[in-house]
Amino acid sequence: MEIIKTDCGLCVNDCGIDCYVEDGKLIKIEGTPGHVINNGKLCSKGKYRVETVYSPNRLKHPIKKVDGRFQKISWDQAYEEIASKLLALKEQYGAHTLFSSTGSVGIEHFEFAAFNQRLTKAYGTPNMFNPEGICFRTRILARQIAFGKYTIEEPRNAKLIILWGHNPDESYFVIGDDIRKRIKTGELKLIVIDVRRIPLAKEESIYLQPRPGTDAAIALAMINVIIEEGIYDHEFVENWTTGFEKLAEHVKQYTPEKAEEISGVPAASIRMIARMFANTKGACILEGIGHMNQYANGLQTERCFGILMAITGNIDRPGGWVTCPQIRLSDLRVPIEEKALGYDEYPLFHQFNKTPPPYGSASMMTEAMITGKPYPVKALITSGGNQAITFPDTKRFLEGIKNLELFVAIDPCMTETTRLADYVLPACTTLEETGIGGFTWCVSYCVPYIMLRKKVIEPLYESKPIWKIWSELGHKMGYGELFPWKTDEEVAKHFLSASSVTYEQLLENPEGMFYGEIEYEIYKEKGFRTESKKVELYSARMEALGAEGLPSHVEPQQSAVANPELAKEYPETLLTGARHQEYINAQGHDIPGLEAKLPEAEAWISPVTAKKYDIINGEMVGVETTQAMIKIKAKVTDDIRPGAVSVPHGWAEANCNLLLDSTVRDNVSSYITLNGNACRLVKLA
Ligand SMILES: Nc1nc2c(c(=O)[nH]1)N[C@H]1C(S)=C(S)[C@@H](COP(=O)(O)OP(=O)(O)OC[C@H]3O[C@@H](n4cnc5c(=O)[nH]c(N)nc54)[C@H](O)[C@@H]3O)O[C@H]1N2
Ligand SMILES: Nc1nc2c(c(=O)[nH]1)N[C@H]1C(S)=C(S)[C@@H](COP(=O)(O)OP(=O)(O)OC[C@H]3O[C@@H](n4cnc5c(=O)[nH]c(N)nc54)[C@H](O)[C@@H]3O)O[C@H]1N2
Ligand code: SF4
Ligand SMILES: [Mo]
């Protein structure tokens, strides 16, 4: 039996795995012992990695919908028909008539976004949408505003962590394990700020339970205490920041008492954690990858976190937020003039950096599909995403696709989204192609590591690597010269040609390799990459682009404070999308072993809220918003704040995205508000 070492690649964690292969069949998977990221461990999903590859849901060949039913077609026919329809639509409506949309896989697997962009930009459309418009781009932008670069948490070296709206036991289990271990050895102190009492809050820690969407008020009050008490890092603030005076004046209004009124967290607790945080070197806010971005005030909340890190001198210092060298891979994008949707409407998001982001504002995607404004959208290609379940506001997604003349979906599996398409093209999974992997920890936890994601078995059935699908379609459309690559290896070598790492080095290091080192305090030599070369606590550039230069607390649009009328009918607060180890977004529900572990979606409700509606633990209830009602099992638990209702996302039978409204957004970043919306419970029986 052959053992091939590779990267699991099923989620953003990039764990090292040993794949046992016999006669071209994947037999067994184990975590690679001693691997830098996971040290031999696998999460619940990783343990079922073999089953995901051989899922009965895998697509076997290209299919086309004829009179409402799918028929098998050849790859050649699929390419031929899709290419000629796309070219005819371009002729009639202009190139912007094509939208492409990827899911989280489109961010994590480099080849996805790169080849998608190459083809769609060659065609001439500016609009690719991916979860960068609803997931974690806001945190990156907020840090770029302050530091001129994306500084990243380094939790493995931290002495004090504030786990702020992040539950790594479910979403990044390796970090959860590491935190638990280091609390036990006394190396690490932990503060948890979460609407739910997550398992780590039950370890030795301080736990604060805010009203949803009020985290900026808490952070601003911490800044207030740190400045008032003079416990900020004087040397760093004086030499390396601008706007401190303005900030000090601005936060005077955010006393801990005021923050208590807003958030429900006691003023004394805010004072205590502010002091602990300011008095520890190696203090780190380890925040939600998605959640803190997905509120009405997401971008400015993120800014508060950066300011807290800066004034306490925890930037570019071990265990704080540090600078991780990023691997530079070749850019396949073809330049185009036209700007993506959102460029004019959300100038800060699209115009802050010299080059605009290569994707449109996701919140505007379905609106354009529905209204035909600013231009008719007649074609959509989705790949590596299950938007019919995961796009926040399912109703608008379903309404939008009715106007399409061509809908192509690319995925290894039959999903709720592929079922709606005119053509479905079978992609292989990452264990069936060679590519570049292992490097996503550099953007989440500051580990400058890279691995070759090796082909373990041949692509199953007629499935193909995603790069090949885009390339072959490109050839059919007349863009052949842009797609010269013939093999996985050629593609990987091309990407690596811009980096300091070679393909051969990766082959020689099957468990992966460090491609660089964290450089602490490099600002001392080069300054920060902002215009002033210092950390910009106040941002003039934000103001020039129409946003507030200093962050404030802004209520979620539908909170009882912001909209008391609505609260009379919908008095509870909806949270969507807390992660489970068993599933990745909508993936994993086809695996019996995972279904057995977590068979039903559950809404977390506190006993206080449950009593109001006469709901008992385990019964099916309705969760209703102004948009819709879904039925879901009630989990009555003390582990959630009264008034908050937390439902997971990615469940077809309890689809929380039916409840959301994509016009409710963070007005600065354009992110759809996934959390903090008004809801009520309905007793069904
Ligand atoms: N209400 C609510 N909605 C949310 C969120 C939330 O918290 N609340 N979270 C949002 C966030 S942060 C994100 S990132 C999105 C995620 O949304 P999606 O990315 O749409 O969710 P997934 O279910 O992970 O879909 C990934 C798809 O990629 C396919 N796939 C998996 N591996 C491969 C592969 O190797 N090759 C190819 N070609 N395809 C593959 C899978 O079969 C699956 O259909 O959801 C967003 N939606
Ligand atoms: N197993 C698994 N892992 C995943 C994913 C998955 O679907 N499954 N998805 C991946 C993706 S695409 C992403 S974006 C990340 C998401 O990663 P995160 O966004 O970090 O999500 P979670 O780790 O679930 O933690 C979010 C926490 O925020 C809390 N919360 C909600 N509202 C508030 C609030 O107003 N204030 C505070 N303080 N806390 C609040 C919730 O109770 C929850 O415990 O996970 C990634 N990892
Ligand atoms: S955490 Fe992600 S990468 Fe690691 S084993 Fe689980 S699914 Fe695979
Ligand atoms: Mo995400």
Image (spheres, helix red, strand yellow):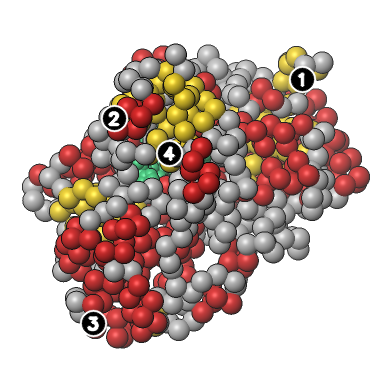
- 117 over 475 or under it: above or below: below
Of marks 1 and 2, the one in the foreground: 2
Label 3 – label 4 distance at C-alpha: 43 Å
- 241 over 575 or under it: above or below: below
* Kind of residue sitting beneath label 1: Lys
Query: In the image shown, does 559 or 575 lie closer to the viewer?
Result: 559
Label 2 – label 3 distance at C-alpha: 46 Å
2 and 3 marks in contact (CB < 8 Å): no
* Kind of residue sitting beneath label 3: His
| Residue 259 visible in the picture | yes
Residue under numbered circle 3: 234
Residue 466 located left or right of residue 372: left
Q: Which mark, residue 65?
A: 1
- Provide residue 675's location: percent of width, then percent of height: 46, 44
Dividing the image into 4 quarters, which one contains the N terminus? Answer: top left
Say which quarter of the image contains residue 5.
top left
Please tell me which of labels 2 and 3 falls first in the chain: 3
Label 4 – label 1 distance at C-alpha: 42 Å
* Kind of residue sitting beneath label 4: Glu
Packing grade of label 2 (10 A; few <14, some 14-19, many >=20) is: many
Tell me the SS state at disc 1. Answer: strand
- Provide residue 241's location: percent of width, then percent of height: 36, 81
**What residue lies at 49% left-to-right and 63% top-to-bottom?**
141
Within 8 Å of ligand 2, the CB of disc 2? Answer: no
Tell me the SS state at disc 4. Answer: strand
Residue under numbered circle 4: 572
Tell me the SS state at disc 3. Answer: helix
